[in-house]
Image (cartoon, rainbow, N blue to C red):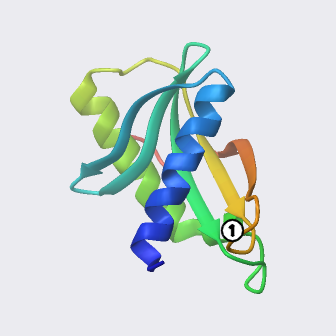
């Protein structure tokens, strides 16, 4: 399985897992000029921007470690664009990370990290 297909399958698994936890998925692979949002969802009245990271193994550490400062800033800028375009200014929001790991052919471990990071800048 190539890396794009692996990522796509990871995002599908994440969306199903989130739905099972009461999230309502609004968008998947939402593209903005600032980058892509893996999943945009609503959970208990909060707009949630979800970054999905999947890895076959832990040789490079857990998947969530790939959500570094650069990636967080990209997700933040894309989220601000989404908020502006969808006119959801003033709606509470948060950033979650879904970590998926496990060797190919095994049952993957899916971990949802709520409030994984906060908006570091402003709207400027």
Tell me what residue is drawn at x 76 percent, y 70 percent: 62
Seen as rendered, the residue at the extreme top is 45
- Residue 91 is left or right of residue 13, and the answer is left
- Residue 24 is left or right of residue 82, and the answer is right
Q: Is residue 76 above or below residue 25?
A: below
- Residue 83 is left or right of residue 107, and the answer is left
Q: Is residue 69 above or below residue 93?
A: below
Seen as rendered, the residue at the extreme bottom is 59
Looking at the picture, how far across and down is residue 57, in whole percent? 74, 78
Residue 120 visible here:
no
Question: Badge 1 is on which residue?
Answer: 63
Seen as rendered, the residue at the extreme front is 105
Tell me what residue is drawn at x 45 percent, y 42 percent: 39
Residue 23 visible here:
yes
**Of 109 and 59, which appears nearest the observer?**
109
Residue 84: name its quadrant: top left
**Of 57 and 94, which appears nearest the observer?**
57
Q: Is residue 118 above or below residue 21?
A: below
Disc 1 crowd rating (10 Å Cα; few below 14, some 14-19, many 20+) is many
Looking at the picture, how far across and down is residue 40, in whole percent? 44, 36
Looking at the picture, how far across and down is residue 100, in whole percent? 68, 59
**Of 49 and 18, which appears nearest the observer?**
18
Tell me what residue is drawn at x 28 percent, y 57 percent: 34
Q: How many marks?
A: 1
- Under tag 1, what secondary structure? helix
Looking at the picture, how far across and down is residue 88, in whole percent? 35, 21
**Of 12 and 92, which appears nearest the observer?**
12
């Amino acid at each position: 399985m190539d890396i794009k297909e692996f990522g796509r399958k990871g995002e599908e698994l994440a969306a199903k897992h989130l739905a099972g936890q009461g999230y309502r998925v609004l968008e998947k692979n939402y593209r903005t000029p600032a980058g892509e949002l893996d999943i945009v969802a609503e959970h208990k009245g909060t707009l949630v921007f979800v970054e999905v990271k999947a890895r076959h193994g832990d040789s490079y550490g857990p998947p969530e470690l790939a959500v570094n400062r650069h990636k967080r800033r990209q997700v933040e800028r894309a989220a601000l664009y989404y908020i502006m375009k969808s006119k959801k200014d003033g709606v509470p929001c948060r950033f979650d990370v879904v970590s998926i790991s496990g060797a190919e052919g095994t049952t993957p471990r899916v971990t949802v990290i709520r409030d994984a990071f906060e908006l570091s800048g402003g709207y400027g």
